[in-house]
Image (tube, rainbow, N blue to C red):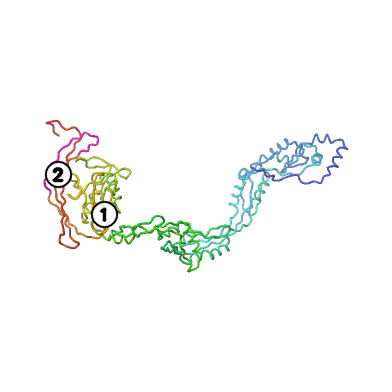
Amino acid sequence: MAKDSGREALGGRAVVVALAAVVLLLGGGYAAAGAFASDRVPRGTTVGGVAVGGQTPAQAKQTLADAWQDRVDAPITVTVDGETTTVEPSEAGLEPALEATVEAAGAGNSWAPDRLWDYWTGGDEVDPVVTVDDERMQTTIQRLDGELGTAPVDGTVTFTGSTVRTTEATTGRVLDDEAVREALVAAYLSEEPTAELELVEVEPEITDADVEQAVEDYANPALSGPVTLVFGDTPVKLRPADYAKALTLDADGGELSLATDVDVVMELVEEAPAQGEPVDASIRIVDGEPEIVRAKPGVSFEDADVYTAFIDLLTQPAGERRAEVDATVVEPEVTTKDVRQLGIKEQVSTFTTYYPHADYRNTNIGRAAELTNGTLLLPGETFSMNDIVGERTRENGFTEGFIISNGILREDLGGGVSQLATTLFNAMFFAGLEDVEHKPHSFYIDRYPVGREATVAWGVLDMRFRNDTKHGVYVQSFIRPSTPGTQGSVTVSLYSTKVWDIEARASNRYAYTQPEVRYLQTDDCYAYTGSQGFQIDVFRDFRRPGKDKVVRTEKFHTVYTPSDSVRCGKPPKDGEDG
């Protein structure tokens, strides 16, 4: 807290000190005068209209405290150009300094001739000494300025689309901080605490002239035409309508300077080679049709270099608005041409299977389809579901579900994934690709095509097929999740160049076998009714697209074992009904 002397007393007086001393000595009363007056306030002294002359310091402080009792917290009326508000003394950090005020009024223990002369000849009107909390005072000044003043407004330049817009600057009328401080201190403790303040004009930092200059130097040139940034061999043209949203003219040291949002600029250079590693060409499916996603060279460059080159080009004239960005370019391993030569141009097969609602099926089938989706097989490559999907663990996104183990159902991680294996097998089947490895379920599950289905088990059973064509094969897989009232489905579509028209045929079921009944006493026992086993033959006829002649036929022989009925508990004793 800093002290402010506020209104000080001790005005100058023309005194002949030596003469006073002589007079007192001659009168023989110097000692007596000093004994009485040495520490008292000079006679006739007043502080803010309160008489304290002739009083000791203690008496004077008490007199002032009593007189100011109602003034200490009295609000100060502040008037500016006819507008009025009030300031609480505590808000402005104002407090009376009684001891300092009494000292300023002339009290004090001294036998000096001039001191005694002051006492006997009379004092003056003295202003109270006031302490000021600088932080509170500054906060109060800011409030008054906000209520009673008007801040200057800078002129601005903005970009809307490809249009330059400006706003005019306005002069402000504000309070002078020091003048406000002095006026509040002077008004404090007076009988009618009033402070009349004046506003002073303040020019804006950015004037209309600055705005006009910025439009001429920066804004108009920036929107005069496109700029081109060159990354290696790749030119990227940026048009004003696109990059105007990245431009700003910011106040800096009393001037407007051109700046850009580097993040926006980097979004605009999306046609540039991908920063970092190169991006191989790939395939995506759009409205059921395969589409090539072009390869992008990798490139190493700094955003700051892009920013600097872009800013420099904005103010260049036509014909000079092109610059190279310092960059190191690395070509992708799989080019757009490579993918185009794979001949992935049409859907060659699609297959959908359906499943009853179960949360674990949505989770496990959905995760497996997600991992499989987007697989690209080059000519001669073999697809392995276990390699693509990976081990069915929680860390890999799978949960517990029912699987077939030793001829019965039990729970394990990844249950339900064979639904995707079956769907993949059928998509492969009707695309005419080479079956490398598949195993049907040990017993028949009636939601699958009989004799045309497959199961997988990590480390034991896989579903594999080979791309034995001259073209690439792209795999698309996705699910439509089930709900408590609807079935779910999983679809696999293969895209390539059609080589075969495939027709499936099947024999009648034969060689039936009957199920048995098993009794289980384990905690994870799941009771159900079994079904017959049987054998069946499925045939795959190959025809050239649009031709009737069968070029070759493949036979798939499947043996389904009976699905034993399972009962949970002890087996019945002989003679009892099981």
- The secondary structure type at the circle numbered 2 is strand
- The secondary structure type at the circle numbered 1 is loop
Q: Give left or right: position of 544 versus 54.
A: left
Looking at the image, tell me whether mark 1 or mark 2 is earlier in sequence order: 1
Q: Give left or right: position of 425 versus 34.
A: left
Contact (Cβ within 8 Å) of mark 1 with mark 2: no
Disc 1 marks a residue whose amino acid type is Glu
Q: Quadrant of the N terminus?
A: top right
Q: 266 or 522: nearer the eye?
A: 266
Disc 2 marks a residue whose amino acid type is Gly
**Residue located beneath label 1 in the image:** 381
Residue 283, image x and y in percent? 31, 58
Real-space CA distance between mark 1 and mark 2, rounded to the nearest whole angstrom: 36 Å
Please give the label number shown on residue 258: none
Query: Few, some or many C-alpha atoms within 10 Å of disc 2 (few <14, some 14-19, many ≥20)?
Result: many
Rendering quarter of residue 125: top right
Residue 44, image x and y in percent? 77, 41
Q: Is residue 410 above or below residue 449?
A: above
What segment carries the magenta color?
509-527
